[in-house]
Amino acid sequence: MTRKLSASRRHLTASVTATALLAALPTLGAAQDTAVADDGYTMLGRLVFGWGTAKVAIDTPQAVSVIDQQDLGEKQPRNLAELFTGVPGVQSAGASARMLGQAFNIRGIGNAEQTGSQNRIIVTVDGAVKFFEQYRTGSFFGDPELYKRVEVLRGPASSTLYGSGAIGGVVNFTTKDATDFIPEGQTGAVKLKGAYDSNGNGRMGTLTYAQKLGEDGDVLFSYSTGSSDDMEDGAGATIPATAGERWSALLKGNYYFGENRDQRLTFSASRTNSDLKNAAVAQTGGAQASAFGTSDLDATDDTVSLTYAHEGVGNPWLDLEAQLSYSKTSTERDNFSLGFLCSAGRMQVLCPNTASYKTTALKVENTFELSGGAWKNFVTLGTQLSHQDRYADSSVGEPAFHPGGTEDKMGLYVQGEFVWNDKLTITPGLRIDRSWLSPDTAAAAQGGADQDGTAVSPKIAALYQFNDTWGVFGSLARTERMPTLDELYSTDGIGAAGRIPSLDLGKEKATTVELGLTYQTQGVFLEGDSLTAKATLFHNDLTDLISANASGSANVPYFRNIDAAKIWGGELEAAYDSERWFAQLAYSKVKSKDKATGLTLADTPAQNIALTLGAKFPDQGVRAGWTVQGFSGVETSSTSTTASGYATHDIFVSWQPVQLSGLEVNLTVENVFDREYRNNLSLDNAPGRNVKLAVAKAITW
């Protein structure tokens, strides 16, 4: 049975915890200048590279979080649902446990059906923009084993550097580097890793080779392979079609050159392949998972990037980065259990089919330093060009509800960062994107025609540091999201009886205000300890939202602009760290309202809180911790995203013995009490108790 918390108790737990922490902060003492900068464990103490100039997370005038290699080792995430524990305002949507079928949700933006989500949340891997959309299939297929770092920038202020339309925000993945494995003073390393999951009998193995090439270069190759049987929920029931096999590979190299070694070439190529037999056609889960039967599904995700960077040591006019990237995500499906129903029209989802997104992009930006007196000033100018091919086909022709076509886009942007006396930081920005969209032959035959448009995204953000302890920040950002290929050219494919292309769609618009407080101090309870906290309030007004007309409508556009909505709420992120103890708190509350109906938007996450308490044993190389997550009940405009409240408990232990150099052991137990529950943004029950064990050994020379 699902454990249910009363509404008043859930609200009290979250509110009292957050309020008590903030109320206690003023009495905890004064901070030193290095209160956070050297603290790599806490999320607020890590550097953020995706904002512009590198900044510590707590000093960034936006809600940002950084997941690093230590978090990934302790969590041992196998998919998106497991990745964002402890990151306020961010979680997955769709399937609860499948390799595929998951998408991102940031502050109530993003859902399992990605038709209208392109650009609302921008996802990059090593700078290459990633996106995929196919009927109930999910949007991101990368293997977590490839990555060493994930940055999450919440809200549309990120649109300046990444693209107009980022209403929810940006998620940046960074792959591993050779230097992550080679200790100082040594030249090479080989690392073997094996992992096991008790729930679903999951197995995974990774081999990584890293080598320095003299003083100026390095190279890394990593290969990982794994498989899993079907998982079970907390009641012992099988979560259908969660079995599968996956492998991934990464080749990455760096070369440094120039008189000051301030120039760099980086090449990165990665592939993830997921092979699922008898997998649900509706990978996102829910009632549709059984209604459409199963098929064999093979998904391949490729990312390639070549980056040239010139830091321009001694030259304030030069800090250049140019990147050429290529991304392709594709699926192949066959062997449908209900294949006898295959026919043109809506039932093409049951025909053997292929689908892909291919994007080639060039991004060039340079940062100028224009400092003088009490001001440190930086101005970033950039341009981004991209070409995207969207393709789909089936044994009975191209699905009209998944139209093919191309999108060419050019973006120009400028962002300033003006810092006065290390107290006041002002960050204005402006981006203009121009796009040209064309249907392929089949979509044009259904009425599609060339379209173009312009989107403008201005912002201003500021942070003022009152003293070494307290700071206040805020931002005002507006962004526009242009209609996508899917929204413009989708039809029912059944002539005059169905929906037609949506060639008159207007742009979605979002205006967001953020206000927040930062707090940082040392010497709270013990010498050398630190306490950091960042609280954010936000309000997002959305207009001209794009939504599908009802299925079965005739001679109406497939998509239309609907009335306005608003999303508002608050987040709290806090961390305590000392030589032997640590703690983290993440709290998020998102509210929303459809202004036409007064109902809560379907993609709204439940109020939630995550608290981690842990201990360190430096002499033994041991870290251990306990995490409790609590989610309130929530009722939205959709029964599929309405759910009861619940609480779960996880524990983790990591061991890196000093006496056995290169050995790492990570033990994680998720859902310790085997609770049966469903997150409101997931369409399936979550997995029950899962014991994860990972053992790795590195050999260096």
Image (cartoon, rainbow, N blue to C red):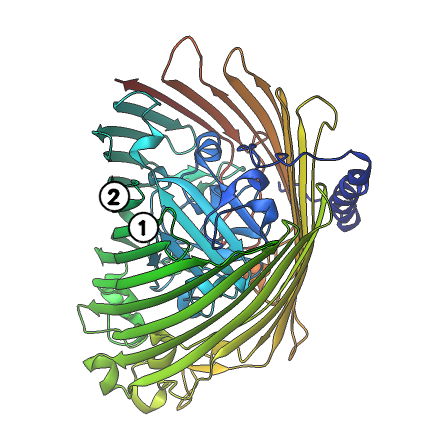
* Label 2 Cα neighbours within 10 Å, binned few <14 / some 14-19 / many ≥20: few
Q: How many marks?
A: 2
How far across and down, in percent of the image, does residue 81 sit? 47, 45
Q: Position of residue 165 (x, y in %)?
A: 47, 70
Q: Amino acid at mark 1?
A: His
Disc 1 + disc 2, Cβ < 8 Å: yes
The residue that disc 1 covers is: 310
Res. 337 visible in picture: yes
- Looking at the image, residue 320 lies above or below residue 459: above
Instruction: Tell me if 622 is positioned left or right of 485 in this view.
Output: right
> In front: 344, or 555?
555
Q: Which residue type does callout 2 highlight? A: Gly
Instruction: Specify whether residue 633 is in view.
Output: no
Q: Is residue 500 left or right of residue 388?
A: right
Residue at left 76%, top 49%? 11
Task: Look at the numbered disc 1 and give the secondary structure of its residue.
Answer: strand
Instruction: Using residue 59 as the reference point, say whether residue 118 is left or right of it.
Output: left
Residue 328, percent from left and from top? 25, 58
Residue drawn at the location 43% of the way across and 60% of the way down: 122
Tag 2 or tag 1, which sits nearer the N-term?
A: 2
Q: Pointer 1: residues within 10 angstroms few (<14), some, or many (20+)?
A: some
Find numbered disc 2 in the image and state the secondary structure of the residue it sits on. Answer: loop
The front one of 275 and 62 is 62
Q: Nearer the viewer, residue 278 or 5?
A: 5
Query: Where 683 falls versus 657 (above or below)?
Result: below
Disc 2 target residue: 258
Percent position of residue 136, x then y: 38, 61
Which quadrant of the rendered structure holds the C terminus?
top left
Q: Quadrant of the N terminus?
A: top right
Examine the image and state in which quarter residue 603 appears. bottom right
Q: Quadrant of residue 581?
A: top right
- Rendered image quadrant of residue 676: top right
